[in-house]
Amino acid sequence: MGERSSRQSNKFDEEISGGEVNWSVVEEDCVDWRGKPSDPDKHGGMRAAFFVLGLQAFEIMGIAAVGNNLITYVINEMHFPLSEAANIVTNFVGTIFILALLGGYLADTFLGSFWTILIFGFVELSGFILLSVQAHLPQLKPPKCNPMMAAEQNSCEEAKGFKAMIFFVAIYLVALGSGCVKPNMIAHGADQFPRAHPKQSKRLSSYFNFAYLAFSIGELVALTLLVWVQTHSGMDVGFGVSAAVMAMGLVSLVAGTMYYRNKRPSRSTFTPIAQVIVAAMLKRKLVCPSDPRMLHGSLHLSNGVVPSPTFPYTPRFRFLDKACIRTQDGNTKESSWRLCTVTQVEQVKTLISLVPIFACTIIFNTILAQLQTFSVQQGSSMDTHLTNSFRIPPASLQSIPYIMLIFLVPIYDSFFVPFARKITGHDSGLPPLARIGIGLFLSTFSMVSAALLEKKRRDTAIFDGKTLSIFWITPQFLIFGLSEMFTAVGLIEFFYKQSVKGMEAFLMALTYCSYSFGFYLSSVLVSVVNKVTSSSRNAEGWLSENDLNKDRLDLFYWLLAVLSLLNFVNYLFWSRWYVKSSKTNNDVVGDDNLA
């Protein structure tokens, strides 16, 4: 073991000449489209990432256009009841985010990000095409009728049997494809920037900003142009346009094939994690050495240089260090399920440390759920006239922050980030944890703005008999859009930059799971609030009526503002803990090749 460690350390030291490192040697294990080692001068960088950004914009156009108007199709064309239609849409969206975990796992373990995107991109495209075909052919839908006019006679025939099967196969092909594509788009784009190369670190930070810009452009086009097409030209044309833009996204992906640096998939994503846990449990009665250099897989580098494939030792979760204690003599090899390296243990420590940060974003996404539900209802109760003849669809209110962000994100990256770098010395301008915190703090004011507006809207309607203009609702959307730019991008950047080898796509998938948990918590919170507030004497629940003038949505928003502020304080504690617990012993690193 010591001989191998010495060879690796000497090999790295040989690449250092005059303080400069040969980054082609330190480069991660990446290959080009032919399977040959990637060339830093030919592969990767922003040129390659732009092709991925094209896919990202087109994919979100297609899926957002379908998701935002799916309930209309389910009710008006498939003739499902309102409650069942709402559940269908909710399950569809939730499935997308949950299946992101599958996409991350397949990419990290078997396929790699590029092939996962390509395969499941065609799965998503096939779902769009099937939806368009069903919406176009009368034979695949129930007979036409107006659900509103026919409600009393129950004369609308609900989709059943083969027709229902076609519909569910189509939407879940879309869910499977989109869920597996989403985390890998971010990961594959970020893979174009080798983290070991100091010049690429700044470009990686810019990539995450531009990825959010691509997302904003896609959402804006979907919420305006594509929804307009669905409304005025029919759902069959609308679904067909979603298929077309998804196909354009896949063309963009394939067009950049010759420029990509592709990370090889790991042999197993979860096996090394399981080995650490099992080994630590088997050796739970042993005492950890006071000197971490005695742990299996540790290297002591006198020149203070830490090679990129290695993990610095951290003193957090020291009970896991027991997995690195050798119980056999040096000539006897222990099973990998009984003896692990420092690198393996540090990877598990990193994953555990990410959990509190991840949990703090759930409340943030619960607030997002309100802007897509109750805030749209608020808009429906206001004067939607832009001119005498043109009304703003309440659902299009969600496009307000994206209009701002397509201008704000480039300004942030071009002007604010360079200025912040001079102050913080961080490549990203603001460190990712600070960026997340700013976003969480701002989200509180989004709910404060929503609560103040709802109080004014309700009082104006009840006491003055007037209707407020829909423009009053703009601040809560703008504030949350700004907070999302900080938190969403900061979370993605933070998770990606955690050096958990072979789990980049899976960690990107975890960020999407936060959306699922946030929306689920929103449903639970609404039910609990209704139950608690309706249990008091002679009181109706805050959200028990369909009439906002009778409900107390403003009080619910104040509750969310308080929860958001408490969540921010909780985040401050865990972010400080993360920074403190991540301090390393610079003299001790783990040898990744000693397992």
Image (tube, helix red, strand yellow):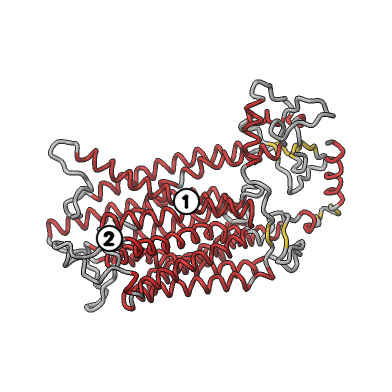
Viewer-proximal residue, 323 or 247?
A: 247
| Upstream in sequence: badge 1 or badge 2 | 2
The number of numbered discs placed on residues in the rendered structure image is 2
Picture coordinates of residue 550, whole percent (x, y)? 16, 51
Picture coordinates of residue 555, whole percent (x, y)? 25, 46
Q: Residue at x 82, y 29 (%)?
A: 332
User: Which amino acid does the dot numbered 2 rest on?
Assistant: Phe
Q: Residue at x 43, y 75 (%)?
A: 241
- Left or right placement of residue 517 versus residue 252 in this view: left
Q: Residue at x 48, y 58 (%)?
A: 176
Q: Eyeballing the image, is 88 above or below 213?
A: above
Q: Eyeballing the image, is 13 above or below 71?
A: above
Q: At numbered mark 1, what does the secondary structure look like: helix, strand or loop?
A: helix
User: Which amino acid does the dot numbered 1 rest on?
Assistant: Ile
Give the labeled residue for mark 1: 98
Q: Eyeballing the image, is 516 above or below 282?
A: below
Q: Residues within 10 Å of mark 2 (few under 14, many from 20)?
A: many
Q: Eyeballing the image, is 377 above or below 48?
A: above
- Left or right placement of residue 156 versus residue 237 in this view: left
- Left or right placement of residue 362 versus residue 431 in this view: left
Screen quadrant of the C terminus = top right
Viewer-proximal residue, 151 or 360?
A: 151
Screen quadrant of the N terminus = top right
Give the labeled residue for mark 2: 80
| Residue 567 position by quadrant | top left
| Residue 260 position by quadrant | bottom right
Viewer-proximal residue, 356 or 424?
A: 356
Report, in whole angstroms, how far the alpha carbon at label 1 lies from the one at label 2.
24 Å
